[in-house]
Image (cartoon, rainbow, N blue to C red):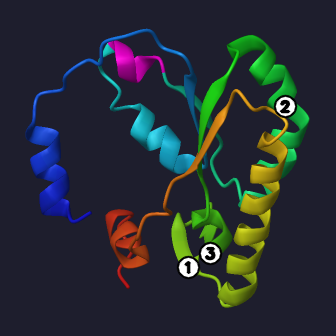
Amino acid sequence: MTEHKLLKYLAKPFVIPAGVKQLTPVVFTDSKGKYLERYCRNTVENSIKWWNQSGRSSSQALVWLKQNLEYKIGHLDNIALYVWFGTCDLTTYDKNSRYITLRTETDDSIQTIVNNYQEIADLLKSYPGCKLSFLETPPYSVSLWNSYQKHSD
């Protein structure tokens, strides 16, 4: 989706869906979720559960999900799980300088993401009342992030 299309979509008034909620929406992500959650305004958006952690790779997400899924579903009933990882698998982040660089071993990283996503799908098969969706890892610009952080190069 282009920025123009996104802005056009966001300019439309939000219509709250009618009916009874059957699944609890859960966004399972890295720091992208932290930034997006800040913009939730209405009751529907505020019902979204956010399982986010800055710097979480897809491998770390898989481990966390294996350890916590049964407990979380026990508290939320059936969920619609939106998995949104990949950025932290493809980049490195220096906490001191807040500088991001692309990893050099991207082929291995992409295969790791694919394998972890497959394991997440296999894990969710044990919960037939739950829905699983994978959100596309957004195109991001390392140079824009670094520029925003006041880096000169």
The residue indicated by pointer 2 is 68
Q: Percent x, y for residue 134? A: 57, 53
Quadrant for the N terminus in the image: bottom left
* Residue at figure coordinates x 20%, y 53% from the top left: 6
**Camera-side mark, 2 or 1:** 2
The residue indicated by pointer 3 is 90
Q: Nearer the viewer, residue 37 or 73?
A: 73
Q: Secondary structure at mark 3?
A: helix
Q: Is residue 138 left or right of residue 80?
A: left
**Camera-side mark, 3 or 2:** 2
Going from N to C along the chain, the mark reached first, 1 or 3, is 3
Residue farthest along the front direction in this orientation = 128
The residue indicated by pointer 1 is 101
Q: Is residue 47 left or right of residue 2?
A: right
* Residue at figure coordinates x 14%, y 50% from the top left: 7
Point out the stretch of residues depicted in magenta: 43-47
Asked if residue 3 is positioned above or below residue 75 in the image, the reply reads: below
Q: Residues within 10 Å of mark 2 (few under 14, many from 20)?
A: few
Q: Nearer the viewer, residue 124 or 50?
A: 124
Q: CA distance from mark 1 to mark 3?
A: 9 Å
Q: Residues within 10 Å of mark 3 (few under 14, many from 20)?
A: some
Residue 11, located in which quarter of the rendered image? top left
Amino acid type of the residue that numbered disc 1 sits on in the rendered structure: Thr
